[in-house]
Structures are given as C-alpha cells and as structure tokens.
Image (cartoon, helix red, strand yellow):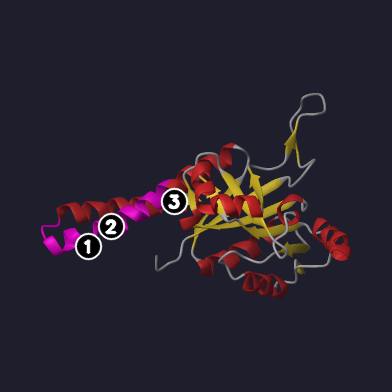
Amino acid sequence: MAEIHKIIASLKDALGVGARSNSQAEAASAPVPVAQSAHRAALASTFARELEAVGGKFLGILTPAEVTNRIVTLAGEIGAKTVALGQGVESDMEEIGEALERADFRIVRTIPVADTERAAMRERVANADMGIAEADFAIASTGTLAVVSTGDRPSSLTLLPPASLVIVQIDRVMANLAAVLAELGAGGVAANRLTLITGPSRTADIEKRIVLGVHGPKSIHVIVVWPRDD
C-alpha cells in the first residue's frame, strides 16, 4: 500500500504545479497525462482495498524491473519448492522463470498439449507450491481478477496450487465488470473461458465455519505493474 500512497502523493503535487502554471503551452499539454495517471492510481487503490477486504494480499505497484525480484522473494517467503508458470499477457514470464531457476526453484512451464497429455500437465501444476499467472484485467470495484484461459495459460494455474500469484498491468485495471466485458467484446466472451477470481478459495460447508483453500488456492497475491516510462 505504501507504493500507492507515494504515487497518489506525487500525482497531487503534479496537479498542484499544473494549476499554478500561467503558461498556455503548459496548460494545454500537462494536465492530460497527469489526469490519466491519477485515474489509474485511483483505480489501483480501490482494487487494492477491495482485494484485501476479501482476503487477498496486495504486493504493490511495481515497475517491470521490480516484479521479478518481488516474485522470487515471495516464493522464498512462502517456502515454495516448485512454481508453475504460464505465458504472460504482456509480461516477460520467461525472464521470471529464469530468475526463479537461478534461485533454485523448480519450474513447471505450462504449454499447449494434446488432450491425452492434459491430465498429466494438470497434475504437474497441482503439485506445484505456487502458480503464477498474468490476468487479462482486474476489477477495482470488487477486487476481482479476470483471467482468460488458453493452452499456455490454463485455468489450473490459478485454481490448483495452494498459493497463487497474479500479475496485472496498470492499464488493465478496470472500474467494474461491465468495463471488462466491454473490453473483451461479445465475441471474446463467447469464444474464451473467462475465470473471475475474488480472493482465496473459501467454503463454509462444514459447520458453517469459513475454511480457506479447500477448493482452490489458500492465498492469493497480486502485483500491479506500472511501466516506469508511463
């Protein structure tokens, strides 16, 4: 959360500078990118608050260069030995996988496989201690992640390992589900399997007591990626 506060504080400072400027040229050019960044920061802040309200863990808004180190650190913190890794939407997941291997973690890379091999791939992912995936979108109003499943980004990545780490780009944090569906379009929704993830898996089937991790990950960690030159 500290990163969010720093970004919002810097944005407020930038807005103040813009308001004091008497230059017509500055007034014409400066407010647009600041307003866009402020809007993104506000959405990310709302998303982080709602994610933690449903039991998720927000790891911060990081630059692409910071993401890999944070993931390696997290894998060590939770005591993972094996990490399952899918392809990214925009992130370089191969770089993350190589960094994990250098830190002596075993890697399971998900790739498109024939139907006859799908069960074996699913079992390897299920045996991993942590799954890493990149979400297509995040929904600020509910702290939800929207992940479209593909052959190299199977839904098992976010459903089977006991710990889940999900990356999402800052410009893919949307206000609500309607905005996500609009981005995907009717064709995209109809043609793909969309998984909506709101917090860790939980159930109250037994004596109405909330138990985490029975039908899916016991913990979910999220990183929002904000390019340094954005």
In this rendering, position of residue 207 left or right of residue 7? right
Magenta segment: 21-42
Label 1 crowding class (10 Å Cα cut-off): few <14, some 14-19, many 20+? few
In percent of width and height, residue 215 lies at 79, 42
Is label 1 in contact with label 2 (beta carbons under 8 Å)?
yes
Instruction: Say which residue appears at 52% left-offset and 70% top-offset.
Output: 65
- Name the mark on residue 4: 3
- Say which of marks 3 and 2 sits in front: 2
- Say which of marks 3 and 1 sits in front: 1
Amino acid type, mark 3: Ile
Instruction: Say which residue appears at 57% left-offset and 67% top-offset.
Output: 91
- Name the mark on residue 29: 1
Please identify the quarter of the rendering in which residue 18 is found. Answer: bottom left
Observer-nearest of 196 and 16: 196
Q: Is residue 60 magenta?
A: no
Residue 78 visible somewhere in the drawing = yes
Badge 3 marks a residue whose secondary structure is helix
In percent of width and height, residue 136 lies at 58, 56
- Marks 3 and 1, the one that precedes in the sequence: 3
- Residue 64 vertical placement versus 21 (above, below): below
Amino acid type, mark 1: Ser
Q: CA distance from mark 3 to mark 1?
A: 25 Å
The residue that label 2 is drawn on is 32
Q: Is residue 28 magenta?
A: yes
**Residue farthest to the top, as pictured:** 207
Amino acid type, mark 2: Val
Residue 59 visible somewhere in the drawing = no
- Residue 183 vertical placement versus 151 (above, below): above
